[in-house]
Image (tube, coloured by chain):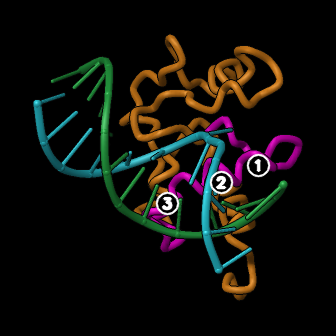
Chain colours: A orange, B cyan, C green
DNA sequence: CTCTTGACTGAGG
DNA sequence: GCCTCAGCCAAGA
């Protein structure tokens, strides 16, 4: 597996798909894992194409655990419902117990 | 090639 | 802890 052959977007998709059930991570964590710590924005930007794919983009939030990308989902609160379906409590677009459900690819992988 | 956009983050007030 | 500003980097026009 030569990840170097994969594009930045593809790498983001791969890592995002590795996020365990009931866990979430931040754009920065993914970006750092990809070696582009300063490209966290690109991670979110890549997610634009994640909708409709196997990528659980709803498990990716910003560093504050805020569902900044919920507006990119079809429904108004679809992202929140998806998270709650996995046992993740969400209140006012913000993930509760964020530290407990946080999944760091740098440490877990 | 240059400019704009952005689902971010860290630092400063 | 919240708000604002600046930096960062890749993709699209």
Q: Residues within 10 Å of mark 3 (few under 14, many from 20)?
A: some
Image point 76% across, 49% down: which residue?
A: A55
Side (left or right) of C10 relative to C4: right
Do circles 3 and 1 both sit on a common chain? yes
Mark 2 lies on residue: A16
Which badge, 3 or 2, is on the more N-terminal residue?
2
Side (left or right) of A97 relative to A81: left
Q: CA distance from mark 3 to mark 2?
A: 9 Å
User: How many numbered dots are placed on residues in this image?
Assistant: 3
Q: Residues within 10 Å of mark 1 (few under 14, many from 20)?
A: many
Image point 52% across, 50% down: which residue?
A: A27
> Residue B13 is drawn in which quadrant?
top left
Does residue A101 sit above or below A49 in this rendering?
above
Which badge, 3 or 1, is on the more N-terminal residue?
1
Mark 3 lies on residue: A105
Mark 1 lies on residue: A55
- Is A108 inside the magenta-drawn segment? no
Q: Which residues are magenta?
A: A30-59
Does residue A105 sit above or below A95 in this rendering?
below
Image point 74% across, 85% down: which residue?
A: A5
Image point 83% across, 49% down: which residue?
A: A54
Residue A64, image x and y in percent? Answer: 40, 33
Q: Chain of mark 1?
A: A
Q: Chain of mark 2?
A: A
């Amino acid at each position: 597996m030569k990840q170097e052959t994969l594009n930045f977007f593809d790498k983001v998709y791969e890592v995002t798909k590795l996020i365990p059930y009931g866990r979430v991570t931040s754009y920065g964590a993914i970006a750092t894992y990809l070696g582009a710590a300063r490209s966290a924005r690109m991670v979110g930007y890549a997610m634009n194409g994640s909708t409709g794919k196997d990528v659980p983009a709803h498990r990716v939030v910003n560093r504050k655990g805020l569902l900044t990308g919920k507006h990119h989902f079809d429904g108004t609160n679809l992202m929140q419902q998806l998270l709650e379906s996995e046992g993740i409590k969400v209140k006012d677009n913000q993930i509760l117990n964020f530290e407990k459900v946080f999944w760091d690819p740098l440490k877990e992988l």
